[in-house]
Amino acid sequence: MRKIFNKLLNIALFGMVLFALDKVPDRLDRLTQTTQNLVKQVGYSGPMADIPSGVPDDYEF
């Protein structure tokens, strides 16, 4: 009985993993679109000159 239950559980978990992996590209596309829309709304164009980066002035990389 325990072996049957374990096999069924393994099959169910494997199915859930496959289902989740199948959804990854769709979710990445949605995330990309959401990010692009937010960037358009906010008008973000990179680091702003008014905000300091936190790097010391005389420090060279």
Image: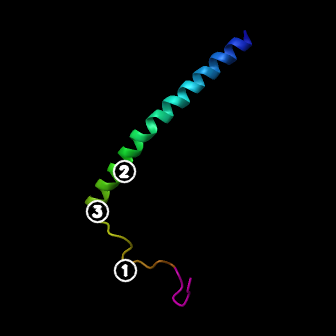
- Please determine whether, in this image, residue 36 is positioned above or below residue 10: below
- Please determine whether, in this image, residue 36 is positioned above or below residue 14: below
- Mark 3 or 1, nearer chain start: 3
Magenta span of residues = 55-61
Occupied quadrant, residue 38: bottom left
> Is 6 positioned to the left or the right of 59 in the image?
right
Question: Residue 56: x, y in percent?
Answer: 54, 85
* Closer to the camera in the image, 9 or 18: 18
Occupied quadrant, residue 23: top left
Q: Secondary structure at mark 2?
A: helix
Observer-side mark, 2 or 1, equals 2
Q: Secondary structure at mark 1?
A: loop
The amino acid type of the residue labelled 1 equals: Asp
Q: Residue at x 38, y 48 (%)?
A: 31
**How many circles with numbers are drawn on the protein?**
3
The amino acid type of the residue labelled 3 equals: Val
- Residue 23: in magenta span: no
Cα gap from disc 3 to disc 2, whole angstroms: 15 Å
Q: Quadrant where the C terminus lies? A: bottom right
Question: Residue 41: x, y in percent?
Answer: 26, 59
Q: Residue at x 26, y 60 (%)?
A: 40
The circle on residue 50 is 1
Q: Are marks 3 and 1 in contact (CB under 8 Å)?
A: no
Q: Dot 1, how many residues are within 10 Å of its Cα: few (below 14), some (14-19), or many (20+)?
A: few
- Mark 3 or 2, nearer chain start: 2
Q: Residue at x 45, y 39 (%)?
A: 24
Q: Identify the residue position indicated by label 3 in the image.
A: 42
Observer-side mark, 3 or 2, equals 2
> Is 19 positioned to the left or the right of 43 in the image?
right
Cα gap from disc 2 to disc 1, whole angstroms: 28 Å
Cα gap from disc 3 to disc 1, whole angstroms: 16 Å
